[in-house]
Amino acid sequence: MGNNENVSYELRPLAERMNIENFDPSLGEDGITHPVTSFTRKFPDREDMILRMPKIWPTVESSLENYGISCSLDMVEHTMTVSTTTKTMDPDVIVKARELTELLSLQIPLSEAIRILDANMRCDFIEIGPLRQGLCAKYGISEEQFTERWKRFQGPNKIRFKTIQRLTGCYISAQGRSTVSLIGKSEGLKMVRTILVDCMRNKMHPSVHIRRIRKNIQNERGLAKTLYGKGGYRCIMEASALMKTSSDFHEHSSTKFIERLHELRDSDIEAIADKVRSSDSLEVNVNAEDTLCAVMRLAPPGLASKICSPIFIRRLLEYAVENSHRKSVLTCLLSVCIEALRRNAYISEHQPAHGSTITVKNEIVAVMLDNLGDLLKLLDVSSADNMLLTTYGKLQPPLGKLRLKIVEFISVLLTVGIQATEKQLIHTEAIPRVLDLFFKYPYNNFLHHHVENIIVSCLESRNGPLVQHLLHECDLVRKILEAEKNSTLDADSVTPTIPVNGRSPPRNGNIGHLTRISNKIIQQGNNNKEIQAYLQGNSGWTEGHADVLLKRNAVENVCQWECGRPT
């Protein structure tokens, strides 16, 4: 070490090279005093480290200089020091710099250690030796057991060690028999820690975890290839697959999913739509539905606007009409249309003065209304012959997800508040068909919820013809009164819902929704003279209101219960 003076001069502190006078607290450009944060790390006093550090230090200096961090190397005291300066923009980078010195002191190669400065990279140090915080001391592992399990973790010729590195994307380095250093992303670090701790504490063979990780990766790639064909492993379907994978090794947050969505291109969206058209796989259609809806909710405005455009919606609905016999395809495309309606309604609500937004919304609704008649034909249940057994009897046929999705589509169409929609619903007699399903399927609460929304939208509409249509052509009040009189399931009626023979028929499950609808009619009647006149002219309604509705409201008023309103 006769050249210490020369070494100290060559490896002078970076603060001098950056023209920073000292490390004292100083005034920044904003006029606020910024305190200095400094960390010092000692490296081993060994010949290999003494020879290595001067060679790699210029690279360390130039890397940290990009982040406004000053660093110095003291070859006499064998220490590395990193400090913030007035040029430090990110206060968290000093923590990264400290981790870099820790990795270098553990003899991690500079090419791997320097990766820690990346915002997405993390490091982890797992104590495995007999020290107080080590796994051996913590779980009472003897020297012999430790040797056996450590060999099992590494595998012959470290083949298992390298496999874990490749699958998790982490750099793994063992410092003797005391510490294991890891560099990688958070998900990979969690995987490696889980494998190592299970191997040491629970004697679990690492191959169990390796097989599980490989299986999850194959599932992700399989879903992506299913959607994209030979084009394969695109970023969006990888993210979608990870969200659907229930595994301890894939705890991806929605933030990462949003980052993947930002990588999508127009060609990717076209590929998804084309694959929906050509595939008969239910899994593919469900994945495509989730992906397209996620893009509309989370992707950049330009890409989301492409899916919500009239041209793209028209294309999707053409697919739906062409493939009306493929229920999974139609259900998927209707979900996308519903999401597009909700997105445009939300944008219009928050940008009421934006004329182009209103125009786009009107065009989308017009495209959907052109295909409404074909969708309503699918609500017919008279010709279906499939059957579903239930606890109260049987459904012949069951309502099914497709019919439920069509009813939801009509409900969302009404909430948009466009007069052309109301006129088209009156013309196609969509509301009478929906009400018919409401009374034919008295135990489908999902259906009842959507139908109630449809009725409320009609009653609250400023369009007089729609309210008249609901009261007169649809004959809503009469149907409610008949349902109140026959509140149990009728075995003699010709409906898809059939009770069990020889058992007393159960009470209909839509009575609660009928009560809410009746109360809404009365509430709107107080503000609408036309509704009020219609109710006053209906003697059955007056009697039903006094004998049934008022008593039921009193019974169901939880505020008057002796125990009080439940918390």
Image: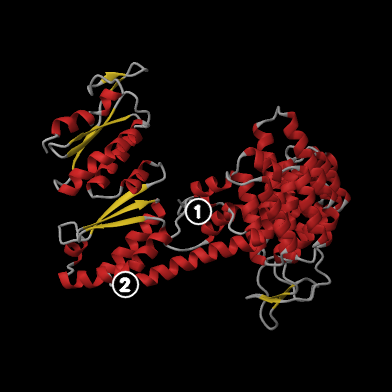
SS under mark 1: loop
Residue 270 appears in view: yes
Q: Name the residue under label 1.
A: 561
> Is 5 on the left-hand or right-hand side of 348?
left
Give the x, y percent position of residue 222.
58, 65
**Residue kind at label 2, given as amino acid type:** Pro
Q: Which mark is residue 11?
A: none
Give the x, y percent position of residue 539.
81, 52
Q: Which of marks 2 and 1 is in front?
A: 2
Q: Residue 156 carries which label?
A: 2
Residue for point 41% across, 54% down: 187
Residue for point 39% across, 46% down: 121
State whether residue 74 is above or below residue 282. above
Kindly indicate whether the residue at mark 1 contacts the one at mark 2 (C-beta within 8 angstroms): no
> Is 237 on the left-hand or right-hand side of 176?
right
Residue for point 51% across, 58% down: 242
